[in-house]
Image: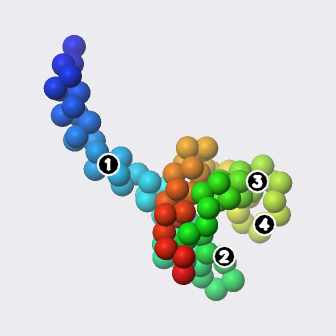
Amino acid sequence: MPTPRNALVLLMALAPFTAQAQPLVAEGCVGCHGPNGSGSGGIPALAGRPQAELVALMTAFRANERPATIMGRVARGYTDPEIAAAAAHFAGQARP
């Protein structure tokens, strides 16, 4: 049975992976939306947009409630927690 000290050591060991998980889920977005989600060509910027707005957009794309060329297919590959993590990441980025 793990002791509280062992649990703390485990949490400390996993902390770097938890901190990296949020940007990793957002990596799939930067290919089209540009570095840090700053926008690219005619593709809109994600950086600095409200987290709730980004979650609502991705959820609408995933449910085919918002028209798109590719985003409906892309959004279906993300779970709710992944969408929330990516949205939090881009909401925390500086606007371009």
Residue 95 percent location from the top left of the image: 54, 76
State the CA–CA distance, disc 2 to disc 4: 13 Å
Residue 23 percent location from the top left of the image: 43, 59
State the CA–CA distance, disc 2 to disc 1: 29 Å
Residue in the image at 59% along x and 79% along y: 39
Count residues near mark 3 (Cα–Cα under 10 Å), then give few for <14, some for 14-19, many for 20+: some
Left-right relation of 91 to 4: right
**Could you tell me the amino acid type at mark 4?**
Ala
Residue 84 percent location from the top left of the image: 57, 49
Q: Is residue 25 visible?
A: yes
Name the mark on residue 68: 4
The residue lying toward the viewer, choosing from 31 and 6, is 6
The answer to whether the residue labelled 2 contacts the one labelled 4, judged by CB atoms less than 8 Å apart, is no
Count residues near mark 2 (Cα–Cα under 10 Å), then give few for <14, some for 14-19, many for 20+: few
Q: Residue furthest bottom?
A: 41
Name the mark on residue 44: 2
**Could you tell me the amino acid type at mark 2?**
Pro
Residue matched to label 1: 17
Residue in the image at 35% along x and 52% along y: 19
